[in-house]
Amino acid sequence: MRILILNGPNLNLTGSRETSHYGHETFESYILQLFKLFPQAKIVFKQSNIEGELINILHAATHEFDGVVFNPAAYSHTSIALADAIRAINIPVVEVHMSNIFSREHYRKHSYTAEASLGTLAGFGMEGYRMAVDFLLRKSL
Ligand code: DQA
């Protein structure tokens, strides 16, 4: 199974940014653990700070992957275009947020992209990505 892990804006700074919410580990270090945990999957990791680039990556993913684990970051709360892109592609998208967006500021409680996704994991730190990959692999059995 081919799985795309896609991160949105500011997540390239994970490890040094707002560590009380997102911890001290870099995503690059975490993704190496995921590669080892799931040797049976072809996992590819991409990140962009640009909304249109994320849309282009999702469009292309339909042809290249069987599922997407997507953390749209702040675009979750603002982007109808990203939600439409998720609806436009024919592969399952699982939304992940490291922090519990429901226990933070009111403007984080709603996610346009979560409405378009198969399901959402929030509040489990980086482990949410592992849980989402595990779900996609089991789903495909
Ligand atoms: C986040 C939550 C968002 O509200 C925030 O804008 C982020 C990270 C998370 O992973 O918890 O950048 O998506």
Image (cartoon, rainbow, N blue to C red):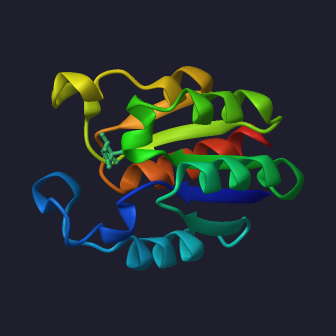
Q: Residue at x 16, y 29 (%)?
A: 105
Asked whether 138 or 45 is in front, the reply is 45
Q: Residue at x 67, y 67 (%)?
A: 43
Measuring from the top left, give residue 129's x and y in whole percent: 47, 53
Q: Residue at x 78, y 39 (%)?
A: 91
Look at the image and tell me in which quarter the N terminus lies: bottom right
Look at the image and tell me in which quarter the C terminus lies: top right
Res 35 → quadrant: bottom right
Give above or below for 111 relative to 35: above
Q: How many marks?
A: 0
Residue situated furthest right in the rendering: 63
Give above or below for 62 relative to 50: above
Q: Residue at x 37, y 61 (%)?
A: 11
Res 41 → quadrant: bottom right
Asked whether 133 or 18 is in front, the reply is 18
Measuring from the top left, give residue 39's x and y in whole percent: 67, 73
Give above or below for 97 relative to 77: below
Measuring from the top left, give residue 46's x and y in whole percent: 59, 66
Asked whether 38 or 100 is in front, the reply is 100
Residue situated furthest left in the rendering: 20
Q: Horizontally, is 20 left or right of 121 in the view?
A: left
Q: Horizontally, is 126 left or right of 71 in the view?
A: left
Q: Horizontally, is 101 left or right of 105 in the view?
A: right
Q: Quadrant of ligand 1?
A: top left
